[in-house]
Amino acid sequence: MSNQRKCGKGSGRASMGRAWMVAACAGALACVGAQAQQHAEIFAGAIGAPAVAALEQDIRVIEHPEGGAFQARRVLVRLDPSMHENDASGLLSAVGVLGTLETYAIVPGLRLVEVPDGFEIAIADLLSKTPGVMYAHVDRILSLYGSTQVVPYGINLVNAPQAWVATRGAGARVAVLDTGWAIGHEDLPAPVASASFISGQTVADGNQHGTHVSGTALGRDNNVGVVGVAPEATLLTGKVCSNSGGCPTSSSIGGVNWSVQNNADVINMSLGGTVFDQAFADACAAAIAAGVTIVAAAGNNNSSVPSYPASYEGVISVASVDSALNKSTFSNFGATVDVTAPGTAVFSSVPQLTIANIFTIAGSSRTVSSFTGSGTGDVTSTTVFCGFGGTAADFPPSVAGKIALIRRGGTNASGAGITFQTKALNAAAAGAAAVLIANNTSGTLTGQLNTTVSIPVLGISQADGDTLQAGPSTIVRAARTVSGPLYANLSGTSMASPHVAGVVALMVAAVGPDRAAPSQIEQVLISAVQDLGDPGRDDIFGHGLVKADLAVNGLLALIGPPPAACSPADIANTDGEAGSDQAVDSGDFTAFFSAFFLPEGAAGKMVADIADTDGVVGPDALVDNGDFSLFFESFFAGCP
């Protein structure tokens, strides 16, 4: 490995010419080979033979030796933005990169590259030590935060109706980066822009999470289902999480990049993980610098450990309370929490999912039962035994991306029995892709979770549990079909975050897009709260419970209302509306000049009087000097 270390060092020269690269990485084949596949011995033992699980057919997850999981064959690398593309290609090829899959305009030099199976960590490590590389790391998998039960009390709790006196969100663009949306749902607006960043999956929501989040932020006020915080805001849907709940960092970065390109005013991300990721941090920072406010869920581990993206600089981190303003039992807390919003038992829109379960051991079908509150997903993997699943210590790091096998029963430190809910939530927090809970008596285990989790939780028989514990080899599948719109109660900081995103949309709509910087919005938002807990900011509730009316009025006081848009008349009616329609458009420009410069009384002069400076009310066949001044003031003030 001595050659590799030499290739990984350099003087950091500014020049990135070809001669420099040849000198810096002379003997690159000796270092790592033209292709890592042909020089596997260089990486021998760097990662071993990692276990690979399929969350979906298109997302393959690898367990990281230091904890967590990442996407197979993918590495995020940021090169010096001044590097010529030919040099970049040569450098990447020299260390075994197979090709570039994606670049992100929002972070110059950042790209997602493909590498050979099994060499993700080794190549990322080598790249991070190579001159001209700012950083490189594996494409870590984040998980959705979500999900328990009751009625949309949150809309009133954040005082959204009081804010609707000033605005209902019209003109604000909200990007929901999640599992997609229930296409054609009766209570959601059709997104003006949508894109899937999950290979092989459309923007259709096969999970429920993204549709639920969207409904809380901007569900329509249409006498059907629910109403969101900003019911007239515009929806942008970016699918960055698979139907089974896996959220590759590269997909999330792609979604942030796409949101900026599509002029989003606010991004909601109800997802996260506990590992700081420089590429993701850079993408969020760049989006905020571009004028986009980012809101994210603080996490559901009842922990003070920072969660990302919520804890990135400039991102608004949202913790959760219940309807009585108590901390939600699952909600994270700590120094990075900014504000609080309702997240326990939030009622919102979801696609109706019909679930069929298939459970096999070594190809042989067995009886299985889906727990009430189970998530959905198609998971193919081996099982990892996790005891009674009562504490985080029961779950080894190897369970990430695999199926947690848990025994029924057991007691906690106080002697109480361990609930199915605790077992399932602990498994999800450990990164398991699915859960099997084996009975401790005859028959297939059935039960309720009294919450909703994003991964499949299935009950199996005692005998099948014994078989799996003795020799783990299984295929678990929870298939789904979408059969129509529905509504459901879910709990999580995932549900709290879109309340705040909706409030930000109301703030933006009140003052007009592009008139308030994200820092100004955050400044007003954290001051426009109901203080909870200890006086002032505390680690449980942040600055307090967001209040939409205070936030809207506070930003209006700071920025002021948007300028008057247009003159109160359309003199050409090129948009097809007769009479005064509050719109001066390009057709008016032509018609006005045609009328203004014609001799008085000439054919065509009979258009309209938009200023009435001659004292005649209404159309009077005279476009005069007063009209000229008023027309120009309105046309060049931003009228369409």
Image (tube, helix red, strand yellow):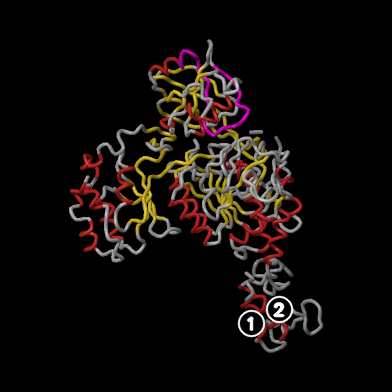
Q: Residue 616 carries which label?
A: none
Which residue is painted at 51% across and 25% down in the image? 389
- The image shows residue 541 at horizontal and vertical percentages of 65, 45
Which residues make up the magenta segment?
Answer: 445-465
Outermost residue on the bottom side: it is 599
Is residue 410 placed above or below 51 in the rendered structure? above
Question: Total of numbered circles in the picture?
Answer: 2
| Badge 1 element | helix
Q: Nearer the viewer, residue 332 or 140?
A: 332
In the image, residue 79 above or below residue 114: below
Q: In the rendered view, would you say 381 is above or below 501? A: above
User: Is residue 285 one of those drawn in magenta?
Assistant: no
**Would you identify the image quadrant in which residue 605 lies?**
bottom right
Q: Which of 485 and 126 is in front in this view?
A: 126
**Does the magenta portion include 456?**
yes
| Residue 314, x across and y down, in percent | 55, 55
Q: Mark 1 points at which residue?
A: 594
What residue would you read off at disc 2?
Answer: 607
